[in-house]
């Protein structure tokens, strides 16, 4: 199968690219190489005859038309997006342009090519989204997001992703475009850009810097190892029912404070400090505006219909992740110099 994967130089996208090539798929990686992208993420497969790279922006319709015509993909996996909530608070315009207008361009380019190709039966447009579109959950562990949970986005990022989800469903209902959708919980793992919580904690800990936790650290997230997520995405692409959405979770709920303390304990074991413990560096900071209290995925549909479950616990996955960052300083060190990395963003005082 030939896959057109957008955002394939990003965190989740590169995990999908690496796994797809390893499984024998042809991959065309379409990425604009914005600040959070890194071609080193796909270096393990870059020399494969199954891999092709196209530098293009999903906001550029002419480039998309050319790429569809030249490569004639059997399926699209659309991951390209602006994804950092804090950056969306400071500058929502990029999120609207990329996540909404860019998805519209992808849908139209895919639809035109699909029609011109004679509407091949096997074609799929897989739209990858987030559980943040569902809003915030109460603390009750019995209440979780299902595929039927009403949308209730609370940040510019989640609102832009909700809008893109609605566009994908509309193109399926209106034009018959064969689509599947997925909404995932918080990802973590190797190649995670160093502005998100897990890599920030690891790298700040190693540098002897404060480990910032918003509010009291009581916000709860379900954590999904990125390589598990990539496996789930390919499963949905191959087996998912057209027009259907699937929630992908790690079945690993933790408060942010619990997660950070787990990371500190792993570092204490693998790379102990000369004096004290890494948890001594924890620092509580002013909360993010509109910070959702809890996300949690009910994974029943993907488990029962497609037979997929995550393979690692959060403790196992975090240990692998910490070791990866310890072994790959040459990857993360240059990224720390990129715009905004290491700065407090999302206070609501930034310019659009």
Image: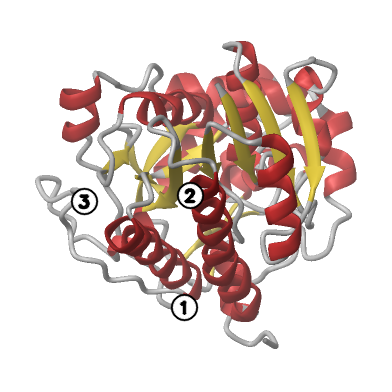
* Residue 199 in the figure: left or right of residue 62: left
Q: CA distance from mark 3 to mark 1?
A: 22 Å
First of labels 1, 2 by sequence position: 2
Task: Please rate how many residues cluster around mark 3, counting C-alpha atoms within 10 Å: few if below 14, some from 14 to 19, many from 20.
Answer: many
Where is residue 286? Give x, y as percent: 52, 73
Decide: marks 1, 2 in contact (CB < 8 A)? no
Indicate which disc, 3 or 1, sits on the residue closer to the N terminus: 3
Q: Nearer the viewer, residue 93 or 53?
A: 53
Instruction: Give the number of the disc on residue 145.
Output: 3
Compared to residue 290, the image places residue 172 above or below, namely above
Name the residue nearer the viewer: 271 or 291: 291
Quarter residue 165 falls in: bottom left
Q: Secondary structure at mark 2?
A: helix
Residue 326 visible to the viewer = yes
Reading the image, the residue beneath label 2 is 115
Q: Residue at x 54, y 51 (%)?
A: 110
Which of labels 1 and 2 is toward the front?
2
Point out residue 279 in the picture as x, y percentages from the top left corner. Answer: 56, 41
Q: Label 2 near label 3: C-beta < 8 Å?
A: no
Q: Earlier in the sequence, mark 3 or mark 2?
A: 2
**Residue 323 badge:** none
Q: Residue at x 89, y 30 (%)?
A: 330
Q: Residue at x 39, y 58 (%)?
A: 168
Q: Is residue 342 visible?
A: no
Between the residue at mark 1 and the residue at mark 2, the CA separation in whole angstroms equals 44 Å
The mark found on residue 289 in the picture is 1
């Amino acid at each position: 199968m030939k896959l057109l994967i957008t955002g394939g130089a990003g965190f989740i996208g590169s995990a999908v690219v690496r796994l797809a090539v390893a499984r024998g798929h042809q991959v065309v990686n379409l990425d604009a190489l914005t600040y959070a992208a890194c071609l080193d993420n796909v270096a393990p497969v870059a020399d494969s005859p199954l891999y092709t790279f196209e530098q293009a922006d999903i906001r550029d319709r002419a480039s998309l038309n050319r790429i569809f015509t030249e490569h004639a993909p059997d399926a699209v996996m659309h991951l390209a997006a602006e994804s950092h909530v804090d950056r969306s608070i400071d500058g929502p315009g990029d999120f609207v342009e990329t996540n909404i207008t860019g998805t519209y361009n992808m849908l139209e380019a895919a639809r035109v090519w699909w029609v011109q190709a004679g509407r091949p039966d096997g074609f799929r447009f897989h739209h990858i989204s987030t559980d943040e579109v569902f809003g915030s959950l109460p603390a009750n562990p019995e209440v979780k997001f299902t595929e039927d949970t009403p949308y209730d986005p609370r940040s510019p990022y989640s609102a832009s992703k909700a809008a893109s989800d609605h566009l994908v469903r509309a193109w399926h209902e209106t034009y018959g475009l064969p689509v599947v959708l997925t909404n995932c919980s918080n990802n973590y793992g190797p190649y995670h850009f160093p502005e998100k919580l897990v890599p920030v904690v690891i790298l700040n800990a190693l540098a002897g810097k404060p480990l910032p936790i918003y509010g009291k650290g009581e916000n709860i997230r379900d954590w999904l190892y990125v390589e598990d997520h990539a496996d789930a995405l390919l499963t949905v692409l191959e087996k998912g029912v057209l027009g259907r959405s699937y929630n992908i979770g790690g079945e690993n709920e933790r408060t942010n404070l619990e997660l950070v303390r787990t990371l500190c304990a792993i570092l204490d074991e693998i790379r102990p400090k000369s004096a004290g413990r890494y948890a001594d560096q924890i620092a509580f900071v002013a909360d993010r505006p509109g910070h959702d209290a809890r996300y949690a995925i009910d994974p029943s549909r993907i488990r029962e219909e497609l037979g997929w479950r995550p393979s690692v616990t959060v403790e196992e996955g975090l240990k692998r992740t910490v070791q990866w960052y310890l072994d790959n300083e040459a990857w993360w060190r240059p990224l720390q110099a990129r715009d905004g990395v290491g700065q407090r963003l999302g206070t609501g005082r930034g310019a659009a």
